[in-house]
Amino acid sequence: MNIVSIFIQTLIGGIGIGSLYALVALGYSMIYRSMGLVNFAHGQIFMIGTYFGIIWYRGMVLGLQLPYAVAFILAILLNMVLGLILERIFRPLANYDLMLMLLGTIGLGYVLENMAVIIWGAEGFAVNNPLGNTPIMISGVAVLPWTLLLIGVSALLMLGLNVFLAKAKIGKAMRAAAADRETASAMGIPVNGTNALTFAIGAGLAAAAGMLAAPIVYVNPAMGAAVGLKGFAAFILGGAGSIPGAIVGGLVFGVLEAVSAGFISSAYTKGIAFVIMIVVLMIRPGGIIGEVTVDKV
Amino acid sequence: MFLEIEHLTMRFGGVVAVNDVSMSIQRGEIHGLIGPNGSGKTTIFNVVSGYYKATGGKVSLEGKPVTGLAAHQITALGFARTFQNLRLFTSMTVLDNVRVAMGQHARAGVWGEILNTRAVQREEKHFTDRALELLRLLNIAEYAHERATNLPYGHQRRVEIARALATDPKIVLLDEPAAGLNEVETTQLRETLLKIRDSGITIFLVEHDMKLVMGVCEQITVLDYGKKIAEGPSAQVSRDPVVIEAYLGKEEDL
């Protein structure tokens, strides 16, 4: 196999994993720009979302074995409900200072993780890949069908989110509430309601990421911490609070990781990706697309 | 009485920003609220529109209590406002800035919008038409599809007024709408205010431009150090020695 096809293969793998980071980073970003809250429990929300879908696929509820697509939809819906509940819990935190916000969200993350241990056990499991583990060859490049599906579905979700925020009336109300809470409420927008919806959408995207990741990772209650950290890194790298920034940040981070694993050493993957992130932030402190500074008067 | 403010007090720690102020506004009038800087005018606006919870006293519109409601509920009762500093949604077009304020009148829910039913399309068209009508009222219809921040300052002020009117208010609170406008723009603003009043909307106006205030307001309330020092028809207030003293100092000082 020549170097070009190896590179393309690595790139596709990186875009795949980067799409997952982007979906997680979008959750951080949306919640941050609407509530001014950095939600360190988002990784755990991702993990719970994964379980919310996988339990149906693996017949863990009443022995029901549902198709993966149905489990995927259920994961998103259930996690959105969880998001609505969590927003109510987090709401008071947004008014406190950073340290309390940090401790509060980290603490809730632990609560979620331990609840998962209690309900589903600390032992994880591998989920069999609905599309199989045989790579297909596309002009000399070997790709897992699941990777292509993952990239396609993530792209659709991100596109859908952007259209929703740009065109839909509720999407516009959410943008208005994020841009200026006081003015938005003077225009009759119920800001707590739009925040709850924002939180629910963030949780729904995390569940989607979890269900797309499940067949290629080991599903267990601790999986949220690692993905949460990478999603957070992508959120900062792209530009905190920026929607396109979260997407770009996630993809860049995923590709960096894959390229450093493929061409340098898989042992240093995380180290190299984080070093590059720090260098980028030294040059552009606002992130790659640092469009929004949250205006908290 | 249309808008009734009774014994309103607002304290921030030890500072009394508004001290036992009572006033009332008749339906359909333009009511001015004037006073030197720091006399509590914007604080009254912020209490009435629900940003601050009053330390004491109450506000009611058409007999219905307003105090204690959330800002968006107060908007739903028929209040709209503009801000002293421009606070447009900078990433949106002029049209979207106005349309986003109409959301509370929307009948279509999330599902209707996703399915893009005919009812939703009709409603959207209605909102767009109404928004354009408001933009025409303020002579800025040709900028409908520009990003709000690309407009000159005076025009951005008009977008704010159009956006406030888009909530379909009974009363609109305008916080220094003439600030930063030149003489021509101020004259146009004066005509706009009269047009808004004639369309049946009551106006509560905080403004430093005395020529504008005296020109359009039927009634004026004057504040100084958080207290009401005078009220009445504008011609009478402008001759009131207490008011002149608050603005210019005592006569012997001059």
Image (spheres, coloured by chain):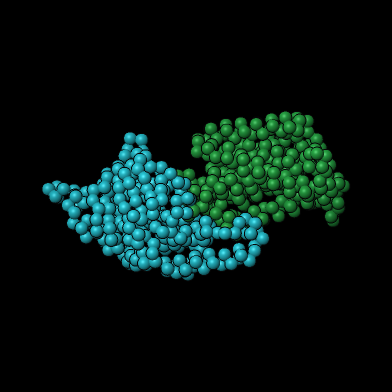
Chain colours: A green, B cyan
Foreground of the two, A191 or A134: A191
Direction from residue B118 to residue B250 in the image, left or right: left
User: x, y percentage for residue B249?
Assistant: 18, 48
Query: In terms of image quadrants, where is residue B115?
Result: bottom right
Q: How many marks?
A: 0
Direction from residue B214 to residue B150 in the image, left or right: right
Residue that protrudes farthest toward the front in the picture: B63
Direction from residue B249 to residue B144 in the image, left or right: right
Residue that protrudes farthest toward the left in the picture: B252
Q: Residue at x 56, y 48 (%)?
A: A193
Is residue A38 among what the camera can see?
no
Direction from residue A132 to residue B143 in the image, left or right: left
User: x, y percentage for residue B213?
Assistant: 28, 59
Q: Residue at x 58, y 49 (%)?
A: A242
Foreground of the two, A255 or B140: B140
Q: Residue at x 77, y 37 (%)?
A: A219
Foreground of the two, A2 or A10: A10
User: x, y percentage for residue B214?
Assistant: 26, 61
- Give above or below for A78 relative to B102: above
Query: In terms of image quadrants, where is residue B212?
Result: bottom left
Q: Residue at x 81, y 46 (%)?
A: A66
> Where is the C terminus of chain A found, in terms of image quarters?
top left
User: x, y percentage for residue A86?
Assistant: 61, 39
Is residue B252 among what the camera can see?
yes
- Give above or below for B154 relative to A118: below
